[in-house]
Image (cartoon, helix red, strand yellow):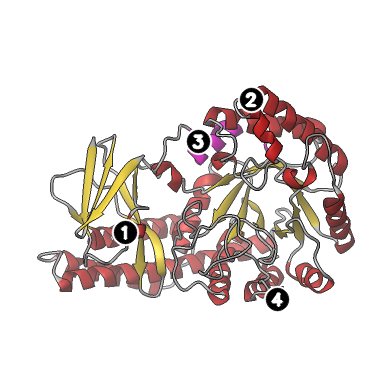
């Protein structure tokens, strides 16, 4: 049993709720399963391995909010590490490495970026002089961390600006869909007009639960009407997720097949045949499965999820070989694997599917930002870019599904009552996040589509306050940001 300890200075710098989400990982950044204890200003993580590793922990930073930050690789030792110091050291090392990588491929960086990095290093040197628990050392470490995050943000902006200019020059060769999920209701005339102004694509969910409320009896009316509207509006359509084995998405009658994988596979096959036969030729992209790796319905084992996912891809390929097919993976940083056993973290799961040559055309990464439980921890723009690049090594196009909260209070229509760990969420912070991070996603030439996964708050949805229309059906500022980014870059 391995144990790593960290001194938190000051002791109340993070809450117990944030501390519980800390985890350790190896060089592949896949979390090790571990147990976390936080008491009297010390964070201790126990795990089954003793290898050197990186600590990842949500950490509040002035001017940046709560971000999941990581240390450099640390070895186990009897004495504890000082957390503010190690977080600053880790972020400086990562930013310097990324600067060198991007410069090696021709990125032009203004002098202000290396100057900021040098400034952060100077503050880090002050923090390491003497006792790192002294107030002056802690302040110097925090200043170093804030400064290097500013430098990383500026570096990422330079990359995005130059990469988007290149992508625009090759837009005809590499089209990128920008859309939102329509949910299971029809848009009124005003909302429909705003949707078409903001998006060139729509995801029609084809929710199994809505279509087949009782086994063998299917009603497609709402989705027929959505498809007809999309055609009339000239929108490209993503159909699915066809198989989404989560509470609130799968039909209740599937409970009859708990423990009966063969029976479940037969039902999945019947639904896939019906859906693809009905809408073949009307969609530009099939999303075969949703949140493939975290399905919480029927207590399925990971190997069973792999089998069902492979079945869905092969079935859709056989029924409609000319339309691209994707599967989606929830929580791409795999934070959830730090709290439960997982033989197939999302990256490994996806790698296995790609290598199996099933006819998979791409992967969709689902980022539901800051929700706990069930969401993705917030990251800074540089780390967001690095994670996308890691998934790109699998060699298939990437699609990204996003949801970011616009509030912290109760949400009467949210199926998941997961609050956001980010305090002060508002429509303005939702818009600010989108304006900063969506260009990072669009700058990647391997990204072929972005979907906002919740359109409205006034109908049942998964995550609190994640829609683009509020409870009064008024558009949030983020919708205007989609329109302006689409006009500027797509």
- Tag 3 residue: 348
Q: Which is more N-terminal, label 3 or label 1?
A: 1
Q: Which is more N-terminal, label 4 or label 3?
A: 3
Question: Dot 4, how many residues are within 10 Å of its Cα: few (below 14), some (14-19), or many (20+)?
Answer: some
User: What residue is at 40 percent from the left and 66 percent from the top?
Assistant: 66
- Tag 1 residue: 16
- Tag 4 residue: 474
Image quadrant containing the N terminus: top left
User: What residue is at 71 percent from the left and 65 percent from the top?
Assistant: 490
Q: In this view, does 226 lie to the left or right of 24?
A: right
Q: Which is more N-terminal, label 4 or label 2?
A: 2
User: What residue is at 57 percent from the left and 62 percent from the top?
Assistant: 464
Pick the residue in front: 26 or 337. Answer: 337
Residue contact between numbered discs 2 and 1, judged by CB atoms under 8 Å? no
Query: Gap between marks 1 and 3, in whole Å?
Result: 31 Å
Q: Is residue 134 left or right of residue 91?
A: left
Could you say which disc has been placed on residue 180 in the image? none
- Tag 2 residue: 261
Q: Which is more N-terminal, label 1 or label 2?
A: 1
Q: Quadrant of residue 416?
A: bottom right
Depth check, mark 3 against mark 4: the one in front is: 4
Query: Gap between marks 3 and 2, in whole Å?
Result: 23 Å
Q: Quadrant of residue 357?
A: top right
Residue contact between numbered discs 1 and 3, judged by CB atoms under 8 Å? no
Depth check, mark 3 against mark 2: the one in front is: 2
Q: Which is more N-terminal, label 2 or label 3?
A: 2
Q: What stretch is highlighted in magenta?
A: 344-360
Residue contact between numbered discs 3 and 2, judged by CB atoms under 8 Å? no
Instruction: Report the number of discs.
Output: 4
């Amino acid at each position: 049993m391995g144990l790593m300890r960290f001194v938190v200075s000051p002791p109340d710098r993070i809450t117990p709720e944030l501390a519980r989400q800390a985890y350790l990982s190896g060089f592949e950044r896949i979390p090790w399963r571990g147990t976390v204890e936080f008491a009297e200003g010390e964070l201790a993580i126990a795990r089954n391995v003793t290898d050197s590793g990186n600590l990842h922990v949500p950490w509040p930073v002035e001017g940046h909010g709560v971000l999941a930050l990581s240390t450099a690789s640390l070895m186990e030792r009897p004495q504890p590490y000082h957390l503010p110091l190690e977080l600053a050291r880790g972020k400086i090392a990562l930013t310097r490495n990324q600067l060198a990588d991007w410069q090696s491929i021709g990125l032009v960086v203004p002098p202000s970026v290396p100057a900021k990095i040098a400034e952060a290093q100077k503050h880090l040197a002050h923090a390491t002089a003497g006792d790192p628990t002294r107030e002056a050392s802690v302040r110097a470490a925090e200043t170093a961390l804030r400064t290097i995050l500013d430098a990383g943000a500026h570096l990422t902006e330079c990359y995005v600006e130059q990469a988007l200019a290149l992508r625009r020059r090759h837009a005809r060769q590499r089209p990128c869909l920008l859309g939102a999920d329509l949910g299971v209701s029809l848009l009124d005339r005003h909302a429909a007009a705003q949707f078409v102004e903001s998006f060139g694509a729509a995801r029609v969910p084809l929710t199994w639960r809505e279509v087949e409320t009782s086994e063998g009896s299917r009603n497609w009316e709402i989705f027929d009407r959505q498809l007809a509207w999309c055609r009339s509006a000239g929108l490209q359509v993503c159909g699915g997720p066809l198989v989404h084995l989560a509470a609130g998405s799968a039909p209740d009658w599937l409970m009859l097949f708990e423990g009966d994988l063969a029976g479940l596979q037969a039902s999945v096959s019947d639904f896939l045949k019906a859906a693809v036969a009905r809408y073949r030729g009307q969609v530009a992209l099939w999303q075969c499965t949703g949140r493939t790796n975290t399905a919480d319905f029927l207590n399925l084992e990971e190997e069973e999820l792999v089998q069902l996912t492979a079945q869905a891809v092969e079935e859709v390929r056989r029924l409609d070989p000319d339309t691209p097919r994707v599967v989606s993976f929830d929580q791409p940083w795999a934070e959830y694997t730090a709290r439960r056993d997982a033989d197939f973290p999302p990256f490994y799961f996806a790698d296995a599917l790609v290598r199996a040559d099933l006819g998979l055309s791409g992967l969709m990464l689902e980022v539901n930002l800051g929700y706990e439980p069930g969401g993705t921890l917030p990251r800074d723009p540089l780390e967001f870019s690095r994670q996308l690049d890691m998934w790109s090594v699998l060699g298939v196009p990437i699609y990204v599904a996003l949801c970011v909260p616009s509030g912290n209070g109760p949400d009467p229509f949210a199926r998941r009552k997961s609050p956001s760990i980010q305090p002060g969420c508002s429509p303005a912070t939702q818009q600010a996040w989108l304006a900063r991070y969506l260009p990072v996603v669009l700058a990647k030439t391997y990204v072929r589509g972005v979907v906002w996964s919740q359109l409205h708050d006034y109908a049942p949805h998964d995550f609190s306050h994640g829609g683009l229309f509020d409870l009064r059906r008024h558009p949030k500022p983020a919708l205007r940001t989609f329109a302006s980014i689409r006009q500027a870059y797509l």
